[in-house]
Image (cartoon, grey):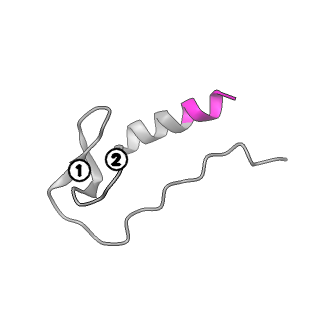
Amino acid sequence: MDESYRATPVPAPTVAGGPPFAECVLCRKPTEYPESVKGVTLCPVCAWHEAQRAACSG
């Protein structure tokens, strides 16, 4: 079975961050990432939805 279609998971930040947490760029809820993380931050729910959309866009 070819698993190349699966999205590569984003690694969790290595530095334990405390509040304040970064906002999700889609729903504005707090994420698991500290505000110091650069780039697009998604909450777990939005990350799951984005992964589903990417998997089905095939």
User: Image quadrant of residue 44?
Assistant: top left
**Residue at position x 28%, y 70% from top?**
16
Choose between 55 and 37: the one closer to the eye: 37
Q: Nearer the viewer, residue 57 or 30?
A: 57
In this view, the residue farthest toward the top is: 57
Does residue 11 appear to the left or right of 33 in the view shown?
Answer: right
Q: Are marks 1 and 2 in contact (CB under 8 Å)?
A: yes
Residue 47, image quadrant = top left
**Left-right relation of 48 to 40:** right
Which residue is labeled 2 in the image? 41
Type of the residue with mark 1: Ala
Classify the position of the C terminus by image quarter.
Answer: top right
Instruction: Name the residue at the right extreme.
Output: 1
Disc 1, SS: strand
Task: Classify mark 1: residues with Cα within 10 Å, few (<14), some (14-19) or many (20+).
Answer: many
Give yes or no for residue 57 being in the magenta stretch: yes
Question: Tag 2, which secondary structure?
Answer: loop
**Bounds of the magenta segment:** 52-58
Tell me residue 26's x, y (percent): 32, 32
Q: Is residue 24 magenta?
A: no
Magenta stretch, main secondary structure, is helix
The x, y position of residue 53, in whole percent, is 55, 30
Q: Residue at x 29, y 41 (%)?
A: 24
The numbered mark at residue 57 is: none
- The image position of residue 31, as x and y in percent, is 28, 48
Q: Is residue 25 above or below residue 22?
A: above
Look at 28% across and 32% down and name the residue there: 27
Cα–Cα span, label 1 and label 2: 7 Å
What is the residue that sits farthest to the bottom in this orientation?
15
Q: Residue at x 37, y 71 (%)?
A: 14
Q: Identify the residue position indicated by label 1 in the image.
A: 22
